[in-house]
Image: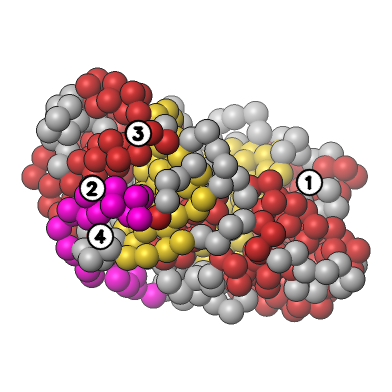
Amino acid sequence: MTTPLYPFQRLSRPLESFRLANGLTVVLHRFDSPAVGFAFFVRAGPAFESPETNGVSHFLEHMLFRGVPAHPSSEELTLALDRVGAEANAATYTDLIALSCKILPEAVEESLALFRDMVTAPVFAGLDAEREIILEEFLEDFDEDGTLTAIDQLSSQILYRTHPYALPILGNKAFLQNLTVDDLRRHLARFFQPGAAVLCLSGNLAASPEVRGMIERTFGTMNPGDGSATATVPPVPAFRGPRLNWVDSPRSQIQCRVSFLGWPVGDPDFALQKALVRLLDNPSGSPLRQAMQDEKGFCYSLAVGIDAYDAAGAVHVDFSVKPERLIDAVYECLRVLARTAERPPSDGLVEHMIHQYVKGKRFAANDLWDFSGRVGFRALFPSAQPFEEEFVASQQVNARDLARLARRLFRPSRLGVTLVGPSCGSSYHRLARMIERFPG
């Protein structure tokens, strides 16, 4: 590799990290900006739920915006949030809940107090109305016949089987139809603990003593908690591929996901796994895009992504094709992946991928949530490689190591194929035989 390493110090000022007396981790990232980025991450979600209570984390995330004691309705709380900032949002993922907001630099402490109340003292007003909204959200994952068509959930069921990682974020509909405020209060008390959470602030921040004082006066008042409820997740059951799941659903295209069970965030090869995904997903130079789109024209869009969990991981290739081209498209996808394992990519292609990676990080250095969120994630899941170390390691990737990882990853025993669209018996059998012969 001839390109010299780009030092992290040129990307960003050092990120500051400290822990409050109650166990809350704080990450500060300073740079010139007209706003301050707020983010709060807590370990929660289906990874820490049971099938019986599945969905309570997502429901709770919705209810955090339904009011706090000083603003006891969703309308009043929304107006209060709009006075101090913009784009207040939240999301539930498999193993964490994230809250974020863009806030005015002069309103940092007021904003922190609002979000502290949201995660410690929500009033849970409007439960039945929010329940109806969530039940409407369920409809997005099912077709007109009530068949599950959410490909991310279907592929998780193939790869993770009975593990909580396979549980849907939306949850167990029967449980949610009868969920009570007491259920939400118990979940809040068990999971929203400082020891299982990270607070991130970035952008136009005051001096450290002043900011720290604001945080101590707001989030420092949270009751201590060690986060033991989310300290570990069970091991993932053994997976033996190849496996095929084709969900019959009327539509003009077939949605395809080709998945390989990979490695968790703490694995020594995790950064290399991410580099392999970048190589395959790169808008320019990707051998997968060149074959699937530029040469064959199989699909309008193609994406290569990753599951990054504490106990497991996966690599996914997503695309949609018309039914008559399905067999050829899946064959071409598998052929390119098998070739990646057999033959190292050129040094020029690897250098280009690294250049794109570094460029992306340079562009993200002044993002209100990117760098602080990456450091915050690693504080939440300490097994992950530190961000600065990963940045350096990602520039030291070489073609030989990528091919080595591809040989470990692109194996039939790790392969799962998920399809959603109009099914055909003869196509199913042809496809099943094809993946059984992979990589032949």
Label 1, on which residue? 283
Judge left or right: residue 403 versus residue 128. Answer: right
Q: Look at 56% across and 47% down and name the residue there.
A: 31
Judge left or right: residue 224 versus residue 149. Answer: left
- Indicate which label's residue lies in the foreground, 1 or 2: 2
Lower position in the chain sequence, tag 3 or tag 1: 3
Q: Look at 49% across and 42% down and name the residue there.
A: 204
Whether 94 is drawn above or below 224: the answer is above
Q: Which quadrant holds the N terminus?
A: bottom right
Judge left or right: residue 288 versus residue 220. Answer: right
Q: x and y percent of residue 275 in the render?
A: 70, 64
SS type, badge 2? loop
Q: Which residues are magenta?
A: 209-235
Lower position in the chain sequence, tag 1 or tag 2: 2
Label 4, on which residue? 194
Lower position in the chain sequence, tag 2 or tag 4: 4
Which mark identifies residue 218? Answer: 2
Say whether residue 221 is magenta: yes
